[in-house]
């Protein structure tokens, strides 16, 4: 079991600002990237947090990540936007793409945004939260062009990525419902976290390089490669295929269909639908029914071992409150990987440790 560092939010943020400056990013980009990554840690999704920085550094050094890039509009048809992320930081181009879609949906009632060629856009729930803050419903299907990590239903090797799906619904007077999940049993980043901590993954999540069930996360982290399994058997598999067809082939103009694992860049295509519920007419009825349904569901008596029934988005908000107050845990292996990445970027690892208060 590796050492764990508990780092206060402000100190961790300062330390990560120092690391991301090593990409040559503008201060605006530094704040956007670090804010998104640290927020993923705050919400409990360490798989999409600061532990991604070593991968980003490798992608940057091989030329697959272009700092200080912004979305380029390829097609503007009013309520239909096709955007090119130009392999820029996904934390930047994702926010820019949603801002453009939000403005159009607010003006016209709806907007479809097809974003392609974005470097890793992180926790997709962040973009649904951005839309929900503007009072908009949003649906997102995302493909992943990187090393294959997920097996098709019934298949014995990896053929595509974790291909997340996200839906956000704003509710007046209360936090939004944000459903955000990988179509694999677990996110690939969670196997990295488990491997770094020396912990097994749950049964039924992973197969080894021979197609046999395993709980050893190394088969998703270091070769010889195994594969993650899709959730719900053919159901998660079906959604993953739709992410490739809509987020990949349609929005991104590329799908994951080769076995090349030599490149470290992670490119995403994202097909998003944004809708202003007021454009459909009686928002009062929608709000009353939505809130009544949520109350009805949460009133279900909890089963043994469960404190209370939750809806999507509530666990993230609870984690955010707790980790904001108590600090963010980073396992020693991940922290060392971040320090090594900092050195590769020309940033002094000792200064990063000093910023974070890690000795």
Image (cartoon, rainbow, N blue to C red):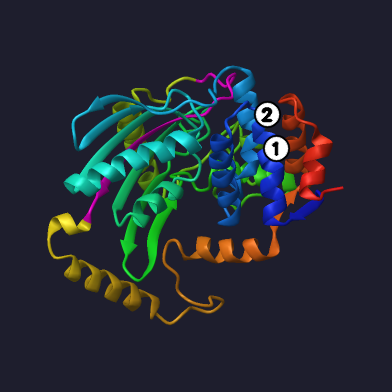
Look at the image and tell me whether residue 227 can be seen: no
Residue 18 in magenta stretch: no
Rendering coords of residue 242 (x, y %):
32, 37
Residue 255 quadrant: top left
Look at the image and tell me whether residue 3 can be seen: yes
Rendering coords of residue 105 (x, y %):
23, 46
Query: Mark 1 highlights which residue?
Result: 18
Helix, strand or loop for disc 1: helix
Residue plotted at (37% across, 44% down)? 234
Alpha-carbon span between mark 2 and mark 1: 7 Å
What range is drawn magenta here?
259-276
Residue plotted at (61% across, 30% down)? 56
Q: Residue furthest left?
A: 281
| In-front residue for pair 216/239 | 239
| In-front residue for pair 9/267 | 9
Residue plotted at (62% across, 66% down)? 322
| In-front residue for pair 118/67 | 67
For disc 2, the neighbor class at 10 Å (few under 14, some 14 to 19, many from 20) is some
Residue 143 quadrant: top left
Q: Which mark is residue 22?
A: 2
Total numbered badges shown on the rendered structure: 2
Q: Are marks 2 and 1 in contact (CB under 8 Å)?
A: yes
Q: Which mark is residue 144?
A: none
The reply, left or right, for residue 112 in relation to residue 65 is: left
For disc 1, the neighbor class at 10 Å (few under 14, some 14 to 19, many from 20) is many
């Amino acid at each position: 079991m590796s050492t764990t560092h508990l780092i206060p939010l402000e100190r961790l943020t300062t330390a990560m600002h120092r690391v991301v400056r090593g990409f040559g990013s503008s201060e605006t980009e530094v704040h956007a990237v670090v804010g998104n990554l640290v927020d993923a840690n705050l919400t409990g999704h360490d798989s999409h947090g600061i532990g991604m920085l070593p991968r980003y550094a490798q992608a940057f050094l091989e030329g697959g990540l272009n700092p200080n890039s912004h979305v380029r509009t390829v097609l503007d048809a009013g309520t239909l936007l096709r955007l090119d992320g130009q392999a820029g930081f996904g934390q930047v181009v994702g926010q820019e793409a949603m801002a453009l879609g939000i403005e159009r949906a607010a003006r016209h009632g709806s907007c479809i945004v097809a974003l392609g060629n974005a470097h890793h856009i992180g926790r997709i729930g962040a973009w649904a939260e951005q839309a929900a803050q503007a009072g908009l419903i949003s649906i997102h299907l995302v493909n992943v062009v990187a090393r294959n990590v997920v097996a098709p239903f019934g298949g014995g090797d990896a053929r595509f990525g974790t291909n997340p799906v996200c839906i956000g619904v704003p509710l007046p007077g209360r936090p939004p419902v944000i459903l955000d999940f990988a179509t694999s049993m677990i996110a690939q980043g969670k196997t990295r976290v488990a491997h770094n901590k020396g912990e097994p993954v749950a049964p039924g999540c992973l197969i080894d390089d021979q197609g046999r069930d395993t709980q050893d996360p190394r088969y998703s982290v270091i070769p010889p490669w195994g594969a993650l399994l899709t959730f719900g058997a053919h159901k998660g598999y079906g959604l993953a295929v739709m992410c490739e067809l809509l987020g990949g082939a349609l929005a991104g103009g590329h799908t994951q269909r080769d076995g090349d694992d030599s490149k470290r860049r992670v490119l995403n295509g994202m097909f998003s639908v944004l809708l202003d519920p007021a454009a459909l007419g009686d928002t009062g009825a929608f709000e009353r029914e939505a809130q009544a349904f949520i109350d009805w569901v949460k009133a279900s008596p909890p089963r043994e071992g469960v404190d209370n029934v939750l809806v999507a988005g509530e666990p993230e908000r609870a984690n955010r409150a707790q980790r904001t107050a108590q600090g963010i845990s980073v396992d020693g292996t991940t922290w060392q990987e971040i320090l090594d990445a900092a050195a590769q970027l020309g940033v002094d690892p000792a200064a990063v440790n000093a910023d974070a208060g890690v000795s």
